[in-house]
Amino acid sequence: MLKPDYPLTTPRLTLRPFTPDDLDAVHAFESRPDVTRYLYWEARDLDATRAGLDTKMSRTAITAEGDGLNLAVVRRDTGHLIGLAILMWTSEQHRQGEIGYILHPDHHGHGYATEAAREMLRLGFEGLHLHRIVGRLDGRNTASARVLEKLGMRREAHLIQNEHVKGEWTDEVIYAMLAREWTP
């Protein structure tokens, strides 16, 4: 079980549960086609963002396989919500999880995704005692691949046209890290 003591802080970020007041900030990036290009879902209208926010607000603890954390990523210097970070518990038996992140494009290229994802790895390895954590991405998403590489994750697989997403066949690339490879 994992119920972090919120808020979590990193050198430049605060990670915290979502609140209803986050709707406009979340919609600012979830409504953008350039943000959702490599995701499973299309850009969201305000109603879809609101529904998604309700789900995000409920994901603050991991108590069983299949549960996850969805945390707002907030810049400490400005207080602005710039994205989200995710940790999923994918297998209790095999002690495995998955991380993910989405940032508003205005905040790309500053290391914020890496910083937030590093905190999710810490929670997975040190808080949930996972053995292995993966990051999965569309094979065309080279920026996300760089984030996972900066974290020290190993590229383990490139699956050719293994998923049909948004009307086209896409490749999936899988990165992973074992608990013994984790260094905070």
Image (tube, rainbow, N blue to C red):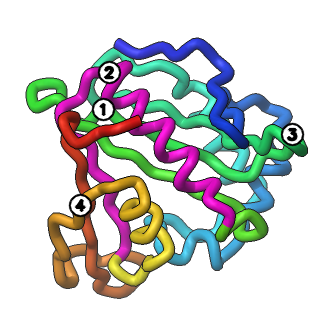
Report the amino acid beneath label 4.
Answer: Arg
Q: Residue furthest right?
A: 78
Q: Nearer the viewer, mark 4 or mark 3?
A: 4
Q: Are marks 3 and 2 in contact (CB under 8 Å)?
A: no
Q: Is residue 133 magenta?
A: yes
Secondary structure of the residue carrying numbered label 4: strand
Q: Nearer the viewer, mark 2 or mark 1?
A: 2
Residue picked out by circle 1: 89
Which badge, 3 or 1, is on the more N-terminal residue? 3
Residue picked out by circle 3: 79
Report the amino acid beneath label 2.
Answer: Leu
Residue occupying image coordinates x 35% and y 30%? 124
Residue 152 drawn at (x, y percent): 33, 55
Compare residues 4 and 138 and report the one nearer the observer: 4
Residue 48 drawn at (x, y percent): 67, 53
Which badge, 4 or 1, is on the more N-terminal residue? 1
**Residue 46 as seen in the image, left or right of residue 132:** right
Which badge, 4 or 3, is on the more N-terminal residue? 3
Residue occupying image coordinates x 89% and y 44%? 78
Secondary structure of the residue carrying numbered label 3: loop
Do we see residue 103 in this rendering? yes
Residue picked out by circle 2: 128
User: What distance separates the C-alpha of mark 4 from that of mark 1?
Assistant: 19 Å
User: What distance separates the C-alpha of mark 2 from that of mark 1?
Assistant: 9 Å
User: What distance separates the C-alpha of mark 4 from that of mark 3?
Assistant: 33 Å
At label 4, counting other C-alpha atoms closer than 10 Å, the crowd grade (few under 14, some 14-19, many 20 or more) is some
Residue picked out by circle 4: 154
- Point out which mark residue 137 bears: none
Report the amino acid beneath label 1.
Answer: Trp
Which badge, 3 or 2, is on the more N-terminal residue? 3
Residue 29 drawn at (x, y percent): 72, 62
**Magenta-tinted stretch:** 110-138
